[in-house]
Image: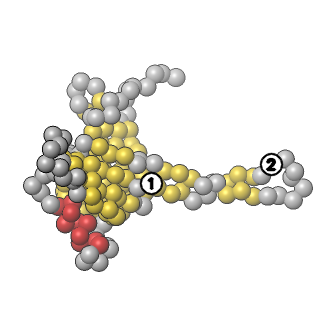
Amino acid sequence: MGEGRTFIPFRFRVSLFAVGGSAGASKELLCGGSFSEVSGLEATMAPKKIIEGGRNWGEIQRAGPTSFSTVTLKRGVTSLDHLYAWFDAVTRQSNYGYRMEGQIDVTGGGKGGVELTWHLSNVMPIKFKGPDLSAVSTQVAVEEIQLVHEGLTLTRKVTP
């Protein structure tokens, strides 16, 4: 078995797409590439335990339902308000069907090619956090959006 490559965690690009209703419809990019941090790319399977009569040494373990963590995106505040507008449309305007598709591309090596891609399906915003404002701070103002989704898949670049 060969050795795998190590990826540098700050080489990534995030894209959020509005998806049309029909199969094969084109994707409209809501935003992309401007995030400084992504966290919560997690999936957890809760096993189902089966207790069998006469089996006194342990339980039978079966695959159970899978749940996905909340994904948090952070970035410096920009003049664009599309993330807040999406959150507002889903929450205050009760447009719960306004879902996105997410894609996080991780690049590697000196050539910057995409090595692996995380896909998020049926993404919905659940929390928007504006920047902490301080007149004496020298840090960049950061906004944050938290997302729930209904599926997480990983694709890797095939290497010869």
Q: Nearer the viewer, residue 78 or 152?
A: 78
Farthest residue, direction left: 79
Q: Nearer the viewer, residue 159 or 58?
A: 58
Residue corresponding to mark 2: 58
Residue corresponding to mark 1: 69
Quarter of the figure with residue 111: top left
Residue 160 screen position, x and y as percent: 37, 26
Residue 133 screen position, x and y as percent: 18, 52
Residue 152 screen position, x and y as percent: 42, 52
Dot 1 or dot 2: first in sequence order is 2
Farthest residue, direction right: 54
Q: Is residue 68 left or right of residue 135?
A: right
Q: Nearer the viewer, residue 138 or 57?
A: 138
Q: Kindly identify the residue that appears in the image at 33 percent across and 34 percent down.
A: 9
* Amino acid on which disc 1 is placed: Ser
Q: Residues within 10 Å of mark 1 (few under 14, many from 20)?
A: some
- At mark 1, the secondary structure is loop
Q: Kindly identify the residue that appears in the image at 41 percent across and 55 percent down.
A: 70
